[in-house]
Image: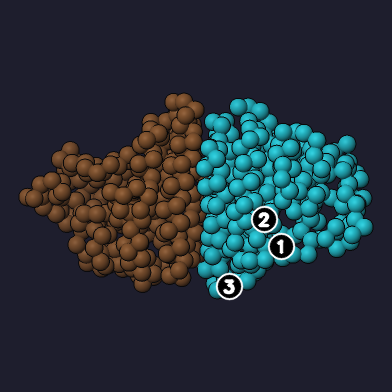
Chain colours: A brown, B cyan
Amino acid sequence: MDDKPTVLKLGGSVITNKEKPLTPDLKAIERLTTEISRAKVSSLVLVHGGGSFGHPVAERYNIAGGYVDQSQILGFSQTHLAMTLLNSWVMEALINHNIPALEIHPSSCAVTKFGRIVNMELKPLKKMLKLGFMPVLYGDAVLDSKQGFAILSGDQLVSSLAIKLGACRIIMGADVDGLYTADPKVFSSAQLISHLTLEELKSLEHKIEGSKTTDVTGGMLGKIHEVKLAIEHDIETVIVNATKSLRVYNALKGEKVIGTIIEKG
Amino acid sequence: MDDKPTVLKLGGSVITNKEKPLTPDLKAIERLTTEISRAKVSSLVLVHGGGSFGHPVAERYNIAGGYVDQSQILGFSQTHLAMTLLNSWVMEALINHNIPALEIHPSSCAVTKFGRIVNMELKPLKKMLKLGFMPVLYGDAVLDSKQGFAILSGDQLVSSLAIKLGACRIIMGADVDGLYTADPKVFSSAQLISHLTLEELKSLEHKIEGSKTTDVTGGMLGKIHEVKLAIEHDIETVIVNATKSLRVYNALKGEKVIGTIIEKG
């Protein structure tokens, strides 16, 4: 079990109904869990986003902006509670599919500094992988050494974990087919880019529009910004549309799939 | 917020129906949450047990005995999932009472060695206390550096945290009034001991019977064994009956209460 792990991200917009607060997309969770189970990747770390669980509460109390006054304290607890509720749906589905999944709660083991991971205990996670468990993390409200608290995005977790665990690949399960020449939700002329080098990505970066729905951790722009750090460490990254059947499965199996592959080049 | 914290344990037999698997005692949780809310202790850490959530699953897969073969892996995930389910009931009740509670999942931040805590990340917990949150932990199935995995009991957590955080007091909320001269569930002649020094406790220890219900972490004998370590560090410990109204409240307020006080002496 000493393979290099794969890190799979499932976006909050994929596993929740982003329009309705606190509403999991149970059909999507069920389908994706089945795909993960069937793919039988020997060493896999799953990170999921918050979607309609984390973001609305986090925004109401301005958690991402850090501690201002005591009135946010209960809001922080509520934000974290909401995220654990979504995580419970995911964990139950995984374990019901006989996947030995174990969550790692970022707020239990990480402290950020101005929203960036500086201190994260990874001993339990590494032991889990060694024994054959599938660690599951999620974007979370965490304590912060400089601003009291912060939002630690799933995307930052993906990149940070991939680097620290020496991952072989990152699979980003998004609600779009991959990277486009422009935002496909706005511009019908937008074209899917199937392959990019890091250099090409950087030159493209300023053209990519942020996604339009509420996302305190940034839309596609934020995702790319985080993932770039892992790609710089030579970790191949594939962006696929996790709302479409078998895309995640194909990516997990290393098969040809519609999406965007980004390599250091 | 730099007071010395109080560590409160709520036994699994208090907050669950120990006879029915996976059944929280919602009335008890509601009452105890109200007592905690009303007591307004400025710095409080809560640790709860597993009761009918953790123990039956843990026993089925012999989690406490450590890793033997791959067939236990899914059972470990199920044990931990069950514990998080109970924890969710507790967290929701606390937050509904406007208590800014945040759980710390032991399996996310601690690794044991032959079942004993050797490595536990406490930075997030300490920051939580500083900001005015109430950290909540629970007896959990955790990874172990020597035996693969282990059960980390709530009692060991109480003692370990009290020592590491320099707690002023431990309150053990049990399903009996305190320590008796014999097991009161078996012997009607058993008498409650209201005060003990550490020396008196040690000489009494061999007389105390283990409790009769299923408890992979040991009954009252196990509890006393763990708590002794904290008392040696001069942390006063009060055992009260948390199934009876206002006992926990009175203990939290530092008021006179039926129970057993143990001091280093």
Q: Earlier in the sequence, mark 3 or mark 1?
A: 3
Question: Does residue A248 lie above or below A211 as drawn?
Answer: below
Nearer-the-camera pick, B253 or A136: B253
> What number is the disc on residue B215?
1
Q: In the drawing, what numbered circle is on residue B12?
A: 2
Whether B214 is drawn above or below B253: the answer is below
Secondary structure beneath dot 1 equals: loop
To the question of a shared chain for discs 3 and 2, the answer is: yes
Say whether residue B152 is visible.
Answer: no
| Residue A66 can be seen in this image | yes
Q: Which residue is mark 3?
A: B69
Q: Position of residue A247 (x, y in %)?
A: 25, 64
Q: Are marks 2 and 1 in contact (CB under 8 Å)?
A: yes
The answer as to whether the residues below labels 2 and 1 share one chain is: yes
Residue A241 at x, y = what percent?
Answer: 24, 58
Give the spatial CA distance, label 3 vs label 1.
23 Å
Mark 1 surroundings: few (<14), some (14-19) or many (≥20) residues within 10 A: many
| Inter-mark Cα distance, 2 to 1 | 9 Å
Q: Residue at x 69, y 46 (%)?
A: B9
Please report the residue visible at 61 percent of the width from the left and 37 percent of the height from the top.
Answer: B37
